[in-house]
Amino acid sequence: MRIGVVTFPGSNCDQDTLDALDTLGVDTLRLWYRDADLAGADAVVLPGGFSYGDYLRSGALAAKSPIMTAIQEAVVDRQLPLLGICNGFQILTEAGLLPGGLRANHHGQFRCDWQRVKVIEASPLFPGLEAGEVLKLPIAHGEGSYYMDEESLQSLFAHGEAWLQYVDADGQAQSWANPNGSVANLAGVARGSVAALMPHPERAMMDILGSDDGHRLLTAWLCGLERRALYARG
Amino acid sequence: MARFTAIVTVTLKKDILDPAGEATAHTLQQLGYPVAGVRLGRHVALTMDAADEGAALRLSRQMADALLANPIMETYQVQVESLCELE
């Protein structure tokens, strides 16, 4: 199994993400935003950063790049597993692969901090991450305020697509635990084979550096990929 | 064919918070101006060749839907002006 990590012009977490996946012992390959195909990648990560300098809207221009056409086709044709981190989340909403959109933090500040997030609903994409589990992960974004209208939000929860929520030390999704004004404290969503989150799991790989919950999250994702591959082989 | 400019004005939907607009309003208030609110938008000037004004308008709306505006949180208005007839 090989996991592709895409570099867009302005990505800056691509190498960290590759290193994190290397740590977990999985084969990786670099993908370039101009590539027209996925070079045999079994799953793809869209890393964090500031693709195209956040020009127009965060993720808007990257969402129209050649590699995204190949990714969109692979998601539709073969349910390509896809994980978006931070700017990757923004790109996925702009590409229409995930619902909703991300806009400027409601307080107008860039927020770089440790943040607790809770798993709202266990996802088959992350076996081992149970509902109610709380993870400590770093966030670093200026445009992470997740938005969708009330009706879409109800549908998101009804379909189990609301995945991660910003919570306080007690695991409660209180307004003061919301770092950016996201609707329903949403930090991550998942739909079909696609999942994304604003926090950076690749920056939380070792307890000695603050948290290894990113290690847990990525391990769960890889476990989901392996299960899927086993199932496909029959 | 004729050449047109289309001004696409993209703004956040009415019920969506605009932090940059609020910060601007706050600064204007600090300067003593009696401003109650500010909403920031994006002004996009497109220059294009099209058969007529209607075609230029359709093309501009397609570009706005495809890239310039995000329909989840933004709306836009288009105003087309004729620049000149092409030979």
Image: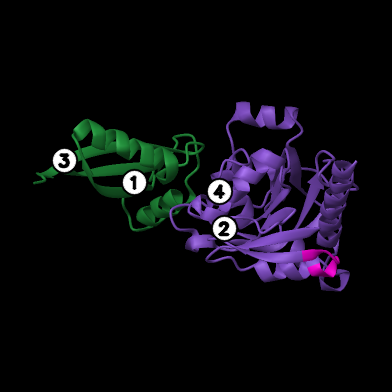
Chain colours: A purple, B green
**The quarter of the displayed image where residue A219 is located:** bottom right
Horizontal side of A233 relative to B62 (left or right) equals right
Which percent across, then down, holds residue A170? 85, 48
Q: Nearer the viewer, mark 3 or mark 1?
A: 3
- Labels 4 and 1 touching (C-beta < 8 A): no
For disc 2, the marked residue is: A142
Which percent across, then down, holds residue B48? 24, 46
Q: Residues within 10 Å of mark 4 (few under 14, many from 20)?
A: some
Tell me what residue is drawn at x 27 percent, y 48 percent. Answer: B46
**Towards the viewer: A219 or A103:** A219
Q: What is the three-letter code of the residue carrying label 1?
A: Val
For disc 3, the marked residue is: B1
Say the numbered circle drawn on residue B35. 1
* Chain of the residue that carries numbered disc 4 in the rendered image: A
Q: Is residue A145 above or below residue A24?
A: above
Q: Residues within 10 Å of mark 1 (few under 14, many from 20)?
A: few
Say the numbered circle drawn on residue A7. none
Work out whether mark 4 precedes mark 2 in sequence or the reverse, and give the earlier one: 4
Same-chain status of marks 4 and 1: no
Work out whether mark 3 precedes mark 1 in sequence or the reverse, and give the earlier one: 3
* Chain of the residue that carries numbered disc 2 in the rendered image: A
Say the numbered circle drawn on residue A69. 4
SS class, disc 1: loop
Horizontal side of A172 relative to B82 (left or right) equals right
Which percent across, then down, holds residue A18? 73, 68
* Chain of the residue that carries numbered disc 1 in the rendered image: B
* Res. B77 in view: no
Image: magenta residue range: A22-27
Q: What is the three-letter code of the residue carrying label 2?
A: Gly
